[in-house]
Image: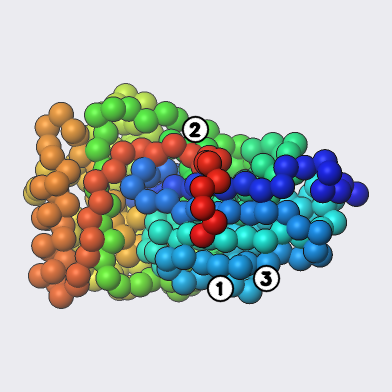
Amino acid sequence: MMNTTDTNSKVKVRVPATSANLGAGFDVFGLALDCLYDEVYMELTTGKSIEILGVEGYDVPEEPSENCAAVAASKVFEMKGYAHGAKMWMRKCIRPKSGLGSSAASSVGGALAASKLLGGLSYEDILLCAGEGERVSSMSAHLDNVAPALLGGFTIIRSYSPLDIVRLEAFSSMGIVVVLPEVEVSTKEARAILPESAPVKDVVRNAGNASAFVAGFIREDIALMGRAMVDAIFEKAREPLMPWLSDIRKVAIGAGASGLSLSGSGPSVIALFDKREHRGKEISKAITEAFLENGIDSEGFICSVGRGAMEISEGAVI
């Protein structure tokens, strides 16, 4: 067993918001965003358990067995054979049930902080431990938000077993608008209504759109990426939870967006635009006004593709 003399004693990490799916890339595509972050502060103790001593910002469970960050950290401790505990503080700036990877940010924060303290874990191991944190929130250890939260950029989950992730760097002309409406959609609820099968024509359409989205990213062709942000299966199934989606998409494209989709399971929407031709501020304004016409307040963010999770200076304890 490892003891505390082999480790650093405290660390603080910052993890970005993320957007998953991006149209037809269900449970496969993920994108790091530079507009919102969570922070996790962790300090090793000689106790036998992980204690959460404070959460600033949005409410999340403070019982360690129900907290994504604590569960992910405990998996790292288990993997490293660390027999003691830790105390944690969290700053939650990414709203839960927003479609912006809030639980993934917590999970990555817990796993990365524990890994930084104990050392010696590969990115693959950190991802797997963070995936166990995600399981607490959504009943599934899916990595579509976890991968970009940890690695940054645009990520593609090719395989879970063995773990195989493709990562692509951002390009400068790609602009992103994210709009978060004042409604909540839980990941569990949004996954529960998904179909178990789909018509072949819809599967083929999704395969074409997902392939075209990746081709557009590689070619830096934002117009192609926008045309490909269409999901004929899963987003369609979720529209009863978000009946305003078609109207919002039309408004966004009319204001200069190349395309728009749900961000993850929603309710946030993500629109892509070409910075050389359009202004994110105008697209964001058009979308928030369209939400208001549907009786929903919302907040818009103009983003770029973000870096992954990182250690930051300790600063003040939350």
Front residue of 229/60: it is 60
On screen, residue 315 versus residue 299, left or right, reads right
The answer to whether 269 is drawn above or below residue 214 in the figure is: below
Disc on the earlier residue, 1 or 2: 1
State the residue position of label 3. 65
Q: Do the residues labelled 3 and 1 touch (CB within 8 Å)?
A: no
Q: Residue 61 carries which label?
A: 1
Front residue of 50/196: it is 50
Q: Distance between the residues labelled 3 and 1?
A: 9 Å
Q: Distance between the residues labelled 1 and 2?
A: 32 Å
* Residue 17 x %, y %: 42, 51
Name the mark nearer the viewer: 3 or 2: 3
Regarding mark 2 in the picture, which secondary structure is present there?
strand
Q: Residue at x 76, y 53 (%)?
A: 77
Residue type, label 2: Arg
Task: Please identify the quarter of the rendering in which residue 295 is found.
Answer: bottom left
